[in-house]
Amino acid sequence: MLAAFKRLFGAERQEAAISAAEPSEVKCLEPASTEDIERFLEAARRADAQGHSPWVLRDPSRLATLRRALEFTVHRGQWLQRDDGRVAHWQGQLLVLRHGEGPVLGMVLACRPDDEAAWQLRFFFIEPEWQGSGHGARLLQAARRTLSGMPLRSRLPLACQAAVRSLERAGFKRMHVNALEVASFEAAAEWH
């Protein structure tokens, strides 16, 4: 019971520190490496099992296709996007939030069709052992800082309550909700 109280109060202190943090204290994200891709795929599989992933990954061939697309993004900075029955090459970045020199806390996949377009956060996650400590908001604030100069957009089901709270804490505004309870969020461009 004492351990539960320590976790509860420790998480509250961490959240207060994150919300009080100045934008200059939020570090930028770093590019992912090939070794980080499996971690991203595992998070996407967990989200898909709950119906919250932008991809349907139950078929091994779809998982292999996503893996190849992520490898292409990591190595070439391009995200392969379906567009009217063909494949478009969008700018893409797979970015990582690390705990100093230590473990990965979370990741975000951002893409956009060209230099003038807003970055779309296609998928982001915090590792299960780090959830509930305000790292989601920290990841998204760092994404805003890393992708500065352009607005950021994200779409996700309202059922992803922790992700919605993280977006709102990071300065994203809810723009609208469609009939399927999928919300669109946008954050204004930031410069640092």
Image (cartoon, rainbow, N blue to C red):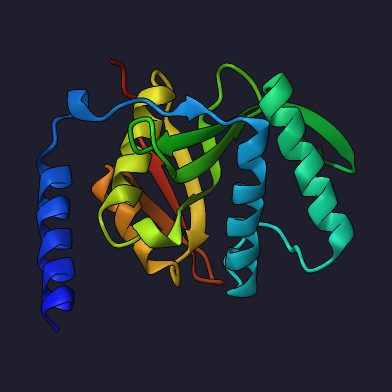
Would residue 79 be visible to someone looking at this image?
Answer: no
110 horizontally vs 61: left or right? left
Picture quarter containing residue 161?
bottom left
169 or 75, which lies in front? Answer: 75
Q: Could you tell me which residue is drawn at 65 percent across and 63 percent down?
A: 45
6 horizontally vs 115: left or right? left
123 horizontally vs 186: left or right? right
Residue 77 vertical placement versus 131 (above, below):
above
Residue 108 vertical placement versus 177 (above, below):
above
- Position of the N terminus, as image quadrant, is bottom left
Q: Position of residue 138 (x, y in %)?
A: 30, 42
Q: Residue furthest bottom?
A: 1
Would residue 63 be visible to someone looking at this image?
Answer: yes
Q: Position of residue 75 (x, y in %)?
A: 72, 23
Q: Position of residue 65 (x, y in %)?
A: 84, 47
Q: Position of residue 115 (x, y in %)?
A: 58, 16
Picture quarter containing residue 143?
top left
Report how many numbered discs are placed on residues in the image. Answer: 0
125 or 92, which lies in front? Answer: 125
- Position of the C terminus, as image quadrant, is top left
Q: Could you tell me which residue is drawn at 65 percent across and 42 percent down?
A: 37
59 horizontally vs 186: left or right? right
Q: Could you tell me which residue is drawn at 32 percent across and 53 percent down?
A: 166
Residue 95 vertical placement versus 40 (above, below):
above
